[in-house]
Structure formats: C-alpha cells, structure tokens
Amino acid sequence: MAKAHPTRAAAENVAILHYHRPDGNYDGWGLHLWGDVANPTEWGAPLRPAGEDGFGVHFRVPLTEGAKTVNYIIHKGDTKDLPDNQSLDLTSTGHEAWRVAATEGHLLPQPSARGADADLSKSSAHWIDRATVAWKIDPSAANRYSLAFSAKGGITYDKGDLTGDLRLVRLAPGALTEAQKAKWPHLAGHAAFTVDPRDADLVREATRGQIVAVERDASGALLAATGVQFPGLLDDLYPGAATADLGPSWSGGAPKLSVWAPTAGKVELALYRDSSGGGRTVHPMRRDDDTGVWSVRGQRDWKDRYYTFLVTVYAPGEGKVVVNEVTDPYSLSLSAGSGRSQLADLSDRALRPDGWTSLAKPKAVPQQKASVYELHVRDFSASDTTVPAAERGTYAAFTGDSAGMRELRGLAKDGLTHVHLLPVFDIATVPDKRADRTEPACDLASMPPDSEEQQACVARTAAKDSFNWGYDPLHYTVPEGSYAAEPDGSSRIREFRGMVGGLNRAGLRVVMDVVYNHTHAAGQDPTSVLDRLVPGYYHRLLDDGTVATSTCCANTAPEHAMMGRLVVDSIVTWAREYKVDGFRFDLMGHHPKANMVAVRAALDKLTVARDGVDGKSIILYGEGWNFGEVADGARFEQATQANMAGTGIGTFSDRLRDAVRGGGPFDADPRVQGFGSGLAGAPNGSPANGDEAQQRSRLLNYHDLIKVGLAGNLRDYTFTASDGRLTKGSEVSYNGSPAGYTASPGEVVTYVDAHDNETLFDALAYKLPPATAMSDRVRMQSLSLATTVLGQGTSFMHAGSERLRSKSLDRNSYDSGDWFNRLLWDCSAGNGFGAGLPPKPDNEDKWQYARPLLGDPALKPDCAAIGAARARYGELLRIRSSSPVFGLATLAEVQKRVTFPTGGASETPGVVTMHLDATGIDPRWKSVTVVFNATPEARPQTVGALKGAQVTLHPVQAAGDDAVVKRSAFDSATGTLTVPARTVAVFVQP
C-alpha cells in the first residue's frame, strides 16, 4: 500500500527552506549544508536558491533516506545570516519552513499553543529606559501587562502561574518613539509598553532583584512570562556613573576604592594582608544612589595590600541572590593567578624601571607612514638561546642584547617604526607561575617532518602549557602575569614598563593588541569578572537573553555606557601610565563607531606637559570585519571598514591580502593561487584555480584590487582599471563589496600575513608549484611583502616573515604551543617548516595537501635563503623610508601623485607598474616608479612620462646583493623599463 505523506516535500524526500530578506537583495546568498542531506556542500560552493516567489527565495534540499535533521548556514561569502549554526528538525517542524533574515527561529510553522508561554530561563523583554519596555509579543487591549520583581529572587513558574515574593510594576501598551527605534534598531519591531507613573518609584528597586515581564488575560490567567534585560534602563537611571571615580585612586598616600554595582543589594570590601589570602578583614562600602557606585576610603597602610569585592546580587544563572567575591574590573595589579586585585599606585617610584621618567621616544610618524611588526611576547624569545633561560618568554627579553633584540634594532635601522604586541593584558588561559605549567614531554625535534606525532604531543599539554595567543581577557588594564619573572603583585608593572623602554631604546614604538569585544567567560564562571559584578549588563545579549558569542567567546557590549567607558579608561591608562604608542582593536567591527571615536578623542587630550605622552601621536587601527549579531548596523553604527572612513582610525584590508595570496582564508583547497603565488604563469594544477580563461580574468581582477591597495584603498581614488575604464576605488568589486573604502591613506592597514591563517611562507608552500626552487620562493615572498611596504597607508607584517617564518602549515596556531609558533633567529635552525603536521582540530582537512609538502626537504630554506629574504625586506623598508611619496596623507595627494601608467585593457597579466610623482616633496627625485613582476619571465613596461628621462635603479637596490634586480634595465628613448622574473624593481628619476 502506498505511504501517505503529510506534505509534498516529505513525499519527494526534500526539505524546502523559504528565505526572506527585507532589502530584497539575494545576490550571492546560499546554503551551506551538512547532516542528513544527500549533497553536503563546501563553504565556497553553497546551494543556490531553486526559485523566487512573493515571500522571497526558496532552497530545495535533497535528503538522505530516513533523514531527521538538516544542518545549515545561510551565508554570502564569509558573511553569515546568523552567527550560530541553524538546523531544521524534520520530525517536529516538518519538511518546509519559512524564515526571515537575521531573525532567530522560524516565521512558519509556529509550534502549537501549550498553555502559558512562560520560560523564565530566557529574557525576551527589554527595559530600555525608566519609562519603556520592549517585548516581542502582540499586545491586546483586553490583556494586562506588568513587570513582576523580587528583591530576594526565586520567582518560579509552577502549575500554570508565577510563584515567589512578587511585587508589580504596571505596564500599559504604547509605542516606541523614532528616537528609541534609532537607538535600539534591533528592537524597532517589538511592541512597546509604558511604565505606569504610579509605579515609577519602584523602578530602581526592581533592578536589584529578579524581574519577569508578565502578560495575563482579563480573568488574571497567565498567558506569557519571560525574564527582562535592562542595560538600557541602568544607563538611563545612572548617567552620573559615566564620570564618577572608579577603581583605585590615591590622595595623601591613602587609597580610595570605587566600583560600579547598581544592581547590588550590598557591596563590601575584603582586604587581604597578602596575595595568598591571609589576614582577611571585611569593610563596608557606601552606595551613591545617584551613580550606583560603591566606595570606601582606606588607610595609608593599605598600600600594596590585596582586595576583592563581596557583591550581594541576583545571579540569573543561579536563579537566586548570591554573594560573589569578585576582583575589580578596574584592577591595576593582581596576585598570581588573578584571584585578587592589589592596591598598587602606578605613580610609585618603585614601579619605575631605570630611565622610565626620562624615556626618550623614537620619533613619532603619522599613521600613513607607520610600518608595523606583529610580534608575540613569548614567540620573541622562547626559542632564543642567546636570552638567559629565566628570561625566555618574558618582558625582560626585550631589555638585553639577544639575537632577537639585535634583529629588532636592525629592522628599526632599516625603517621599521612599530612593534605590535599580541595581547599583553591579563589573560585567563596561561597559568601565571611556571611551576603551574606543563610543557610537552616528547622529543619533538626527532620526529619526522610530516608526522602526526608532534601535534598530538602538543595537544596533550595545550591547556596548561606556557603558550596562548592571549585573546582571552580577564582583566583589561593589568599586564599579563605569565610574561613576568615575578607574576605576584606589582613587579609585572615594572617589568612591562621595562619592555616598553627596551623597545623604545631599540628605535621602535609599541602597539598593544587589545581585546575589548569579548571576555573569557560570563555568568558565574570563576573567570567572569564583569558579569558577576553587574549580571546581564556588560555583555551583549541576544533577544532571548543568552550571551552572544559570535566573536568566539562572551561578547561584551561597548554600546552600553559603562562598558564603553571601561574601554576608554583602560586605553588611556595604558597610554599614560605605560607609554604605549598605539592600539590594535581585535574585532573592532563589534564596537560602535562612537566608542572608537571616543577613544581617539580621549587620547588626543593627552599632552606631554600634563600626562607625559603626546596622545595625538598614538596610532589606532583594528579589524573592521562585519559579522555576527551586530552585522550591517543591526544594533548601532559599527566600527567597520567603510564606516571608519574619515575618523583617522585604520582598518585591516583583506582586499590586497587575498589578491596577493590568492583565494581566501577559508578555501577548502589551499592551493588557490593569486598574484604573488603563481597565478601569473606558474599554475599548480589545482582545479580550484579554474581554466586558463578563468585564471586570466581573476588575475586581472586581482590587479585592480592591488592597485586600489597600493593607493591606500581610497574609495574616491580614480584610475584605469584592467578593463580600460576609468574607475573609482569604490567601484572595484571585492566579493560584492567595494574594494576602496577609506577617506585617507592612513585609514588602511595593508598586509599579506598576520598571526591569523597560514604565514606567507606557508601559504606560498601550498600555492606555488611544488617544484618551485627555493630561490624563486624567496623572490615571491619578497614580491608579496613589497605590495604592503611600498603602498600608501600603514604597512603591517607578521614577525618572522622577513625570515620566511613557517608554522609548519598551521592556519590557527592560537594554542599550538611553542613548537609550532617558534620564531627562530638562528637561520641554521631553519624557519619552522617541517615541524610535523599542524594541529588536527583546525588543519586536518588540509593534511592531504600538507603531508607531501612537509616531507619534501627542498622546501626547508637554508641560511642563504633566509638571509636573502631578510635582506630584501630590509631594502624595501629603506626604500619606503627614502621618499615622502610612500607616505602621502590625503586623497588629493594620492590622486595627484600615484598612477598606474601601464594599466588598462592591454596591461600585462602578472605585472603591476606604479608611478609616483615626487615633484615638490622629495628634494632628490622627481619620480619613483615601482614594477611588480610576478611572472616567471622578464617583462618590459613602457611609461610615457619617463620617455627621454634619466632613470636609474633605486640606490638601495643598486647597492644590494640581489644580482637579479640589478639586471633591470631602462630605455630612455622609449621610456621602457624591463624587470626580471619574480622581481620588484624600483626606479628613480633625479
């Protein structure tokens, strides 16, 4: 007998997903599929819509027999519709569903009603100011609405109704104002309720306990109940907190401690004699009702004592009022292990290393002239035997005369301006004390170069070893303890300052990598500071009250006043008290633009006379990626690439990076080639590169991306594109987005490798044909780096790329230990390649490509290769420093001086020629012309402006040891420059 199916889709054994975008733009959107589907997809080849209708588009997904679940992500390139993975439960939802873009859950089908909709584990109502609640329900004039609260906590849903010690704030249906919708765009579609004026005096009291939004029918029967989010309310109730004293402050040698805890019923200070917890005394703290700040004044003998706060507060995760012992979010010093804050006075002379007060800074450079070297504190010296064993991996390694410091001084002499340090604030993932760490016990060096053994051994101790990138914030304004020789107490302050001084004396300014977009943990986790102090405030919550985790961890909410203030205050402290010269913001696109502008304004107010530093010389840049629950301005105007135009704050450009390397960082096949990796005349045979016509088309598109990048990624810069059209930077497409987006060159950070993804050497190992000679790999490494060094804007490079650094093909070495992250200053030890297959969790899908490469001894560079690479990078830096034409400040100057004279419909694939007019700003040269020849053959390039001119190879290259570049030639009669294969040649015209 034929089986009856509930729907046609079920009968055809397919799932149909209907998808609606309010903007009506479905170009590029597709489904990434896995689970019980007949045809799982690769990330780069999603399932496209099967058709379009009045709702939007629909996807038709063939299923396996007996399918129960379809797992999917709706995405466009690397932009996800929702941050988390989605699923369709065929057994409960059925085979067909309708959903709206960027909205959790299905529009249809809706679950059938089952009595009251009461889930107190979620918080779907939003108390946005003292008078307004937003709630995503359909209000009825016949029903009654209120906020039930209990200062004791413990509200429960039992037998169809709420129970507990309840008090009520009455609500009336209302409407959100246009101003409220603009401030809370993600709530613009919610129903609004107004607090009854008769209950206004209950509002502050309500925030000190559990709050539940309640809907009842006319008879009083419960219809719906949910928890309440109220960060907006706290900002409205306590505006004075934005300027109140916070953290430790000193007057007459005695401290005052202040902490913002407006929802606490009581806050006390626990004071300890020592870091281990001895001699504890408890002191009451006084609440200021206008600000929500609790404070206590101490005695002079409290100096250097340790402390915590005892906070009596309702904890949603516990469902009750608890007493949390928590450290100070404004901590300036900590015990080892970060369990207790310390009352340290940063102005104490004992915390100043020798020469700190009179420290002479290297000359400041504007952001468009900065060249940045991204370095990890532990990488720098952990493998450097010229550093005393006790100082390896510590701040102290930057104060001596080790091989690493000699190299940094050499780079500074060449023209490097800044060292960017990966996170050096207090992190949660490395034990502070060496005795508490466990290192790999295997003889890693003895294992085969393509073995799985190394990564397995490293993984066994990864959670307790000495290495982590450090993107796991615990306390934002205290130096990390694991990098200190003495992590217990204020010694780490002095040691950190010593590091800054050592780098400054080497001729380098210091940039800190800061991570204010998330914390290591939230809720009642022991490593959660902010959320145990003011639960539900400092983190960004999704519509149901769960903490957003699109950044990997618990996302913070700098759009809330006091989280935004914490960011500004912390940055100012690092700048003023530690003389930090720049800041790189991790996932800056998760910050409001206004928060970043506030950081810039606060720094600009710092002066040498008053603060000891020139705040205007401090550079700012960050990751302007657009994704997650804040994507496309869902909650505020973000600090994303395009939005930061005009602010003077830089963002990393993925445009030139992908054009030079080829493909993208998430390609299933890592052999996708680019301008600097063989797409121009050196095919590697991967089908992912397409046929010859596709390769040529992509290469010419890469030309345009590189030209825009060399010109500072300016949105309004015009040039002749590879199709012959006069084009603006904003009109060149990068995966559907504008390639040009900046307003001035200093707003772009140009790079081809960083700590994320494979190093440049490793990317080229994947992409260049396997038989490519090492000498040619060195040339392609140098050519790739040249696109960042010789372009407009900030030049950025991952430490060691000037030495062909490898991480043995590891694309995500954040927890891969010292072994895979080695930075080797001794060329006889190699470059790190062939250290075994990279760690399984993030690399196993690439092992099939990695194994034969790692086992090939020809891919291990010798000292000659490493030395050549280092020499070429030094030459590039010296060339960059040799003329002001490489650091133009404005669009007008770039438009006037930067051209691509051989560009257009007949340009040579694989060759980019840039002409820089230096008249009036360079006393030596009238012009500088750079030819990037990425092909395996010598190429002529005719530049009309040079016809009849006297042109020579740049003196830096003419005096160098690269015999190949010296074969470059110039024909004055025709203005033709001829450049050897795989070479960057720079020509100057007196």
Image: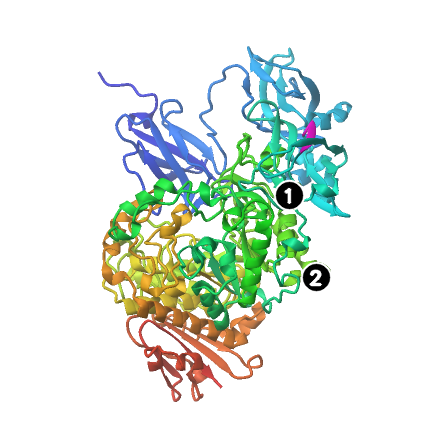
Prevailing secondary structure class for the magenta stretch in the rendered image: strand
Residue 509: tell me if it is visible: no
Residue at screen point 43% across, 42% down: 437
Q: Is residue 737 above or below residue 839?
A: below
Question: Alpha-carbon neighbours of circle 1 within 10 Å: few (<14), some, or many (≥20)?
Answer: many
The amino acid pointed to by label 1 is Tyr
Q: Depth check: 967 or 283 in front?
A: 283
Q: Is residue 810 above or below residue 946?
A: above
Q: Depth check: 314 or 376 in front?
A: 376
Residue at screen point 56% across, 66% down: 505
Kindly report the distance in space between the C-alpha atoms of the residues bearing marks 2 and 1: 23 Å
- Residue 401: x percent and y percent? 48, 65
- Mark 2 element type: loop
Left or right of residue 611, residue 103 in this image: left
Per the image, the residue denoted by label 2 is 607
Question: Alpha-carbon neighbours of circle 2 within 10 Å: few (<14), some, or many (≥20)?
Answer: some
* Residue 266 is one of the magenta-drawn residues: yes
The part of the chain drawn in magenta is: 264-270
Circle 2 or circle 1, nearest the eye: 1
* Picture disc at residue 330: 1
Q: Is residue 572 above or below residue 407?
A: above
The amino acid pointed to by label 2 is Thr
Please state, as top left, top right, bottom left or bottom right, where the N terminus lies in the image: top left
Q: Depth check: 15 or 263 in front?
A: 263
- Residue 317: x percent and y percent? 55, 26
Residue 72: tell me if it is visible: yes
For residue 330, which quarter of the picture?
Answer: top right
* Residue 982 is one of the magenta-drawn residues: no
